[in-house]
Image (cartoon, rainbow, N blue to C red):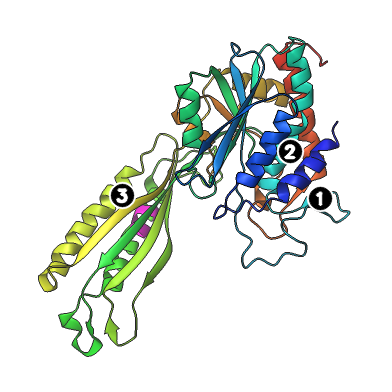
Amino acid sequence: MSSSYLSLLQTLVGFDTTSRHSNLALIRWVEQYLQAYGLSSQLTLNDDGSKANLFARIGRPDLPVLLLSGHTDVVPVDGQAWTSPPFTLTDKGDGRWYGRGACDMKGFIACVLAHVPEWVRLAGEGRLQQGIGIALSYDEEVGCLGVPRLIDALLKEQVPLAGCIIGEPTSMRPVVAHKGIAHYHCHVQGRAAHSSLTPQGVNAIEYAARLITHVRRLADTEASFGHHQPLYDVPFTTLQTGTISGGTANNIVPKDCEFTFECRWLPGDDPQRFVDSVRDYADNLLLEMRQVAPEADISIASRVYCPAFEATPDSEVLQYVEKLCACQGGDGVAYTTEAGVFHAAGIPCVVLGPGSIEQAHRPDEFIEESQLLACFDWLARLTAELCRVQGGD
């Protein structure tokens, strides 16, 4: 059975599920795969019906469900120098399997799907003492946009949830905490003028630069004097400006400038205090700008918000992971996963999956076959725990 995850991974990588595209072809394929084993799937669609989450349950309906969750979307390959076709799983003979999403995170999904025949058999024999849920989401890579609808549907239907394992690439080491992430879009509107008459204009780029400098000061203050948590590789809350655009010509005072800034905060922190500080500073700048141009304006809008995450102490899912990984606790990371959204909904989580985060989003993304085997074997040991069979089956 263990070799089946490779054929499954080959199929999954073959679907171009870049976030800007639909994931429905992959979801429909998984739906049919599960249907072949007698399982029905529940889909939750986005507003225009072009994307879907999937949930399927194995085991008696009265059993609490342990979710095994993964996102189906991948990041773009545009501008990256790949040495093999990105949407074809490629074996280069070095113990690695190359393809977009092989690591992040279709490798985990393939291992989960490879166990479905065994889980269905055990459920049919009445041996599963806890339900298993397969949860696949859309648009994780662009801000965890899909999974809230999946969670809302599960809660609305009162599916009893024991916890969730999110299979992001962690090299099969448990991640028990991660930072939250938020993106904010700022639009500075000034007044255009000929550059020979600069006092008659309001330079939107220059005022945006002052706001960006304020964001930088907030970041530097946090790094020097803010709360530090040694569990994380970057042990403090961070802020940075990611994109900027503005202006039309060198001899025109720019009327408009737009930029985005990001905050990644530690669990227990609140990003709103940074946004409030930026807004307060923007209000002061507006007083200056409107002395020349009453129509001047500065707007700040939230574009992405993914909560921070800390594992629930003594939760059942954490006990499973600690026992099967022979560890206590786990790592904290600066990147963000859907665990924050599950956790905010009251669902205990752990992040654990095959592959290294260092390979995610890069050209020639790969997953080591040893990591796939480790994940498949780990899920087999988890299955034994869910059957309460000591030492396996």
Tell whether 94 sits left or right of 199: right
Residue 68 percent across, percent down from the top left: 63, 29
Task: Kindly identify which residue carries mark 1.
Answer: 96
Spatial separation of the CA atoms under disc 2 and disc 1: 15 Å
Give the mark, 1 or 3, whose residue is nearer the N terminus. Answer: 1
Quadrant in which residue 372 is drawn: top right
- For the N terminus, which image quadrant? top right
Residue 208 highlighted magenta (yes or no):
no
Q: Which sits in the foreground, 233 or 181?
A: 181
Q: Residue at x 42, y 57 (%)?
A: 240
Task: Kindly identify which residue carries mark 2.
Answer: 110
Magenta segment boundaries in residue numbering = 215-219
Residue 218 highlighted magenta (yes or no):
yes
Give the mark, 2 or 1, whose residue is nearer the N terminus. Answer: 1
Spatial separation of the CA atoms under disc 3 and disc 2: 40 Å
Q: Is residue 176 above or below residue 303?
A: above
Secondary structure under the numbered disc 3 in the rendered image: helix
Residue 343 percent across, percent down from the top left: 48, 29
